[in-house]
Amino acid sequence: MNIKKETIDLSILDDSTISWKAKAIALTIQKHPEIFQDIESGDKVAHLCHMGADGSISVQSGLKQLENSGYLVRKVIRGTEGEPGYVVGSIWKIVTPAWKIELLKRKKKGKNKRRKEKINE
């Protein structure tokens, strides 16, 4: 499967609510789309465990933190082979959560407003 490499979004590094473990996992997922966006790439948690020193429980807790905060989207791909609910694989993607985009917009507006006030003084 030919997957286009994307630019890595580093904005997660500025989020103080996310652990360094989860940040490292997010950057690894973004750096290797050929693994994490390939439906047939197998056990993605095992891939992460082999890329670092953490075990599966540690990796899974980092993934859970990313998912709960809106940074990780995991899409399960179901097929028709065999029985109902047959899972073909999954795709993982790191995204910037909507709440974070809104927060950044507000901060930017606030900075622009302060600049205008300084100019008018």
Image (spheres, rainbow, N blue to C red):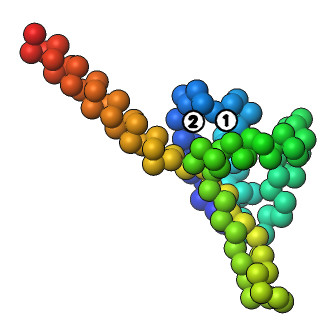
Q: Residues within 10 Å of mark 2 (few under 14, many from 20)?
A: many
Q: Can residue 30 be seen in this view?
A: no
Of 116 and 31, which appears nearest the observer?
116
Q: Relative to 69, is 84 on the left or the right?
A: right
Q: Do the residues labelled 1 and 2 touch (CB within 8 Å)?
A: yes
Residue 106 position in % (x across, y down):
33, 34
Q: Is residue 69 above or below residue 19?
A: below
Residue 70 position in % (x across, y down):
57, 48
Give the residue type at disc 1. Answer: Lys
Position of the C terminus by quadrant:
top left
- For mark 1, what is the residue? 23
Q: Is residue 82 above or below residue 112?
A: below
Extreme residue in the left direction: 120
Q: Relative to 9, is 21 on the left or the right?
A: right
Of 80 and 41, which appears nearest the observer?
80
Q: Can residue 108 be seen in this view?
A: yes
- For mark 2, what is the residue? 12
